Image (tube, helix red, strand yellow):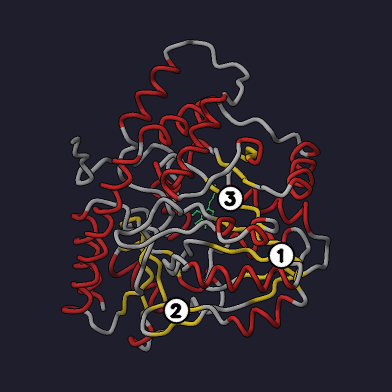
Amino acid sequence: MKKYNFDKIISRENTDSVKYDFREEYFGKADVLPMWVADMDFETPDFIVDAIRKRAAHPIYGYSIMSKTYHDSIVNWQKTRHKWQIEKDWISFTPGIVPAINFAILSFTEKGEGVIVQPPVYFPFFEAIKANGRIQIENSLHIDSQHYQIDFGDLEKKAKDAKMLLLSNPHNPTGRCFTRAELQTIGDICVRNNVIIISDEIHNDLILPGNEHIPMASVSDKIADITVTCIAPSKTFNIAGLATSSVIISNKALREKFQKTLHQLHIFRGNLFGYVASTAGYQHGALWVDQLMQYIQQNFDFLSEFLLSELPHLKLTHAEGTYLAWIDFRETGLSDKTIKDKLIFEAGLGFSHGPIFGNGGQGFQRVNLATPLSVVEEACHRLKKVF
Ligand SMILES: Cc1ncc(COP(=O)(O)O)c(C=O)c1O
């Protein structure tokens, strides 16, 4: 069996990488250890690089179609990895999930209508609601012994005033993979209240060993009927720069509405190398993803043990998926500004600042663990010096 190497340090500086080459502008310090933007420091797997090289060897990169193989690879991957049977016709191309969320808001809601989010959550959700003149309604998650829970009573109340729910599953930044029972309850509330669910499942393949991702639309036919699912090979295979993703809608009326928006904006074609990379990843990536998630688990374990023994006042949230560690700094008693300044200017650490994830983010920091273990170790030692 092939063994992939996730220990290798690869310099990403001067590759126009947001995570590396935007540090000075973002943190005010160009040399922080970058553990913020959610892409990985691991090399994109060889079967994807080879497929791109092979296509690149033909010197004409003209307009390209999404082939049957491209679509088949998406359908097969969902079936084998997530036990979710989808049809080719349900898939629409989008050049990213954040664009897809904006297209969904435009397609299914009107200005002034309410959209539910579950903070602390991936902040572009807030931006999409605001930029399109919709109203943000919050169904905050609650932390209970380092594990996040949904307030269903509150969701039931808020759903009455909402047209849409933006769900992050697995949830960024808390690392929750919602259970079938939780998804069923969310889904039933939305069905009862005519709320459309946009299920952002971009982290669906990044499941820590022993946990499971359940696609929202696989929970029941009624829930599938009101669900718009966003998936992508971008996080899974570290190809976010190729801007290739899919929106899966089984309900024909909803799908036609969504596709009308795409046509109005003339967005139905992506980039050739995105198709090639996506196809190769979904065709050949199972073993690589399995090994990747074992490696990420090792990074979580190291961080967890280090905090417990060396920095017990910093608490690691229990993650079930994603490569994002969500650390609770509240017991330090320090303000968010002080935590941020100490991290950047004293420890030289570039984390994602909790408050950007909205209510419930205060006192937390998000740390990207998709990096060699030696980097996680270095980050831990720097943390210890300062906290
Ligand atoms: C929950 C979630 N949705 C969407 C994205 C980004 O999607 P895209 O780059 O395809 O727009 C991210 C990236 O971190 C994410 O965590």
Horizontally, residue 101 falls left or right of residue 120, namely right
Q: Which residue is mark 2?
A: 336
Quadrant for residue 27, please give it.
bottom left
Q: Position of residue 254 (x, y in %)?
A: 75, 50
Q: Which mark is residue 164?
A: 1
In the depicted structure, whether residue 111 falls above or below residue 231: below
Q: Which residue is mark 3?
A: 230
Q: Cα distance, mark 1 to mark 2?
A: 31 Å
Q: Is residue 222 above or below residue 162?
A: above
Q: Quadrant of residue 96?
A: top right
Residue appearing at x 19%, y 72% in the figure: 306
Do residues under tags 1 and 2 come within 8 Å of each other at their CB atoms? no
Q: Which residue is found at the position 70% from the left and 36% from the top?
A: 267
Dot 3 or dot 2: first in sequence order is 3
In percent of width and height, residue 25 lies at 47, 54
Secondary element type, mark 1: strand
Residue depicted at x 45% and y 40%? 77
Above or below, 270 relative to 182 = above
**Amino acid on which disc 1 is placed:** Met
Q: Are marks 3 and 1 in contact (CB under 8 Å)?
A: no
Instruction: Provide the secondary structure element on which disc 3 rests.
Output: strand
Q: Image check: 184 left or right of 256?
A: left
